[in-house]
Amino acid sequence: MNRAFSSSLVIALLATGCLTPKTNDTATSGDGGATGGSVTCADIRQGNVEQETIVTLNNVVVTSPVTQEGDGFFVQDQGGGAYSGMYIFLQGSFESLFLEVGDVVSVTGTYVEYYDFSEVTVTSVNDITVTGEGSATVTPVSDIGDPEQWESVLVGLSDQSFTSCANSYGESTLSGGLTVNDLFYDYDADRGATVEQFIGLVEYSFSEYKINPRDASDLVGFTAGSGCTFTPAEIHDQAASDPDGLGAVELEGLIVTSPLTTSGTPGFFVQAPGGGEKSGLFIFLHEDVNTSAVDLEIGDVVDIKGSATVFYDMTEVAVYDAADIVATGSTGTVTVDTMTEAPADWNFWEGALVELQDVTAVTATNSYGECELDWNASLDDWFYTVTANAGDTWESLVGQVGYAYGATVILPRDAEDAGGASTGEPIAASVAEVQQGTVGTGSLVTLTGVVATSPASFDGSGFFVQDPGGGEWSGVYIHKGGAEFEVESGDVLTIKGTVTEYYDLTEIVVADTADVVKTGTGTPVVTNLSATPSDWEPYEGVLLSLDSVEITSDEDSYGQVTTDWGILVDDLFFDHGLGDGEVVSSLTGPLHYSFEEWKICPRAASDL
């Protein structure tokens, strides 16, 4: 329950009787929650009081100190029992409030439900009056059952064990099913620790019930457990059987197998000596971690403290402070596990460093640096981008095994990990065959004798070509990728590249400068339209001329204007300068598709 409080708030737990008793002329006994009316905690908890009612709890017993954040404390009806407890939320300045567990008090405030947690909000120290001394009754509970009845009650659970270490939020789990939290006390309990009786206050926050010990004495008969040191295999097993039971972990003597990621999720991989199934883990670096302070080399032996978790089905250990990653000064042997075929279950290898034998790319590398493989996995670029075409092969491919967006990914760390590649043979195709789906996405193709219908775009990323005759399905966008070459409208070209769909725009992605060869010069055929077609899709990438176009808006911040043809005019090649109300008798340019809009792209003033 994190709520802003005055930094000057200091609430000491000292002697009772420091407050002047407060008189309440409006309180009447048993009136069921009228303004200032006297009610019991059970009245509120059992639904007999309306929300936002001002109530007085008379002669209730203080059962807790003030929380570590200084924002409240618990009380309960004398004698305890089901529905007997209530949380008192302190809203304002309470420097002069002095309470002890066992004080009998009267409290006036407003009953509210804070995310389904019952509270009485108090805004003045004068609304809390110490009336005497009593006993904070602990209600024994053998089976927590429906925890709703025990909300805010001081309970005692017998024969409990900690099933996890505390996570980064100070929470762990008990065998009885409740989460342990640290509202009052930073308890120190490890996995497998046991208590003869666990005493604490039950709260409800973030949609779950949690129990809060007040100090060490509430862990009656505490016996330490097996500690918080885990192996990667134990973490993987816990994640598979009970992912909610994961928490704080300590890892010792693991070997760094990768550098820090260069894209996507920040972190690195480690493995247990010897490698094998369940030997590897991804170490996620929280945004609070200064990554420049994480100075690691592949082969370093490290000890790590963090919080084990399953994030979108990938098991990882989150680290929140660079100081929790300690290089021991030793160097270990990095094990690479060789595979000759895809495993039946990649889960066992998640986090491991593997070498795949005889690998073929099923698709080309897309704009996200991903490429499907024939191993029921994909290449990805967390460390290094592999540019591949469909049909490319590797005798061996080394990489970390990860999991992202519902798929297993292989993550090469550098060029050496993806060495020995052989390029597949391209398919001879026309633009129309590509646009009509005869040649599928991911195919490596050669387009022969196509005519460039535009220069390179302003940003230099690509240009349009079309089959010599023009018409429907004849045009396509060429994305230059890493290639460097000059092109002009009218160039006749032979192009080798990979068919991709980039946000529903069909593209041919060129990987190398040598894959575009000028073979001559020609005249691009312009396809004329006198009326808006029922479907623009057949004209994607085609060089069009539209008759009598009225501009219906001024230019937006992206250099675009709307038209009475239902499409935009864009400045991909040329700053057209068109404005609302202008009419162009003929508008020429390739038809582009981006951000779910069709756009005609004039190339020069002569196209207007």
Image (cartoon, helix red, strand yellow):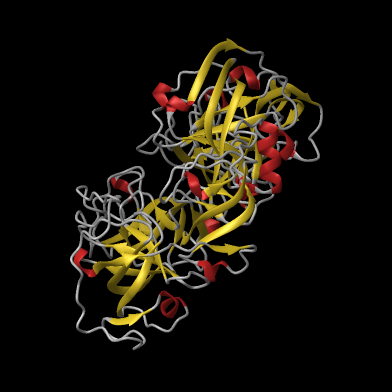
Q: Nearer the viewer, residue 428 or 37?
A: 37
Residue 337 locus on image (x, y percent): 74, 23
Residue 40 locus on image (x, y percent): 39, 78
Dividing the picture into quarters, in which one does residue 496 lie? top right
Residue 564 locus on image (x, y percent): 34, 67
Q: Residue at x 44, y 42 (%)?
A: 186
Q: Residue lying at the far bottom in this picture: please name it.
A: 31
Q: Residue at x 42, y 65 (%)?
A: 530
Q: Considering only vertical position in the picture, is 244 above or below 483?
A: below
Q: Residue at x 38, y 49 (%)?
A: 601
Q: Considering only vertical position in the picture, is 531 above or below 525?
A: below
Q: Considering only vertical position in the picture, is 165 above or below 260?
A: below
Q: Is residue 520 visible?
A: yes
Q: Residue lying at the far top in this picture: please name it.
A: 330
Q: Quadrant of the N terminus?
A: bottom left
Q: Is residue 389 left or right of residue 340?
A: left
Residue 231 locus on image (x, y percent): 66, 30
Dividing the picture into quarters, in which one does residue 293 lie? top left
Q: Nearer the viewer, residue 547 or 315?
A: 315
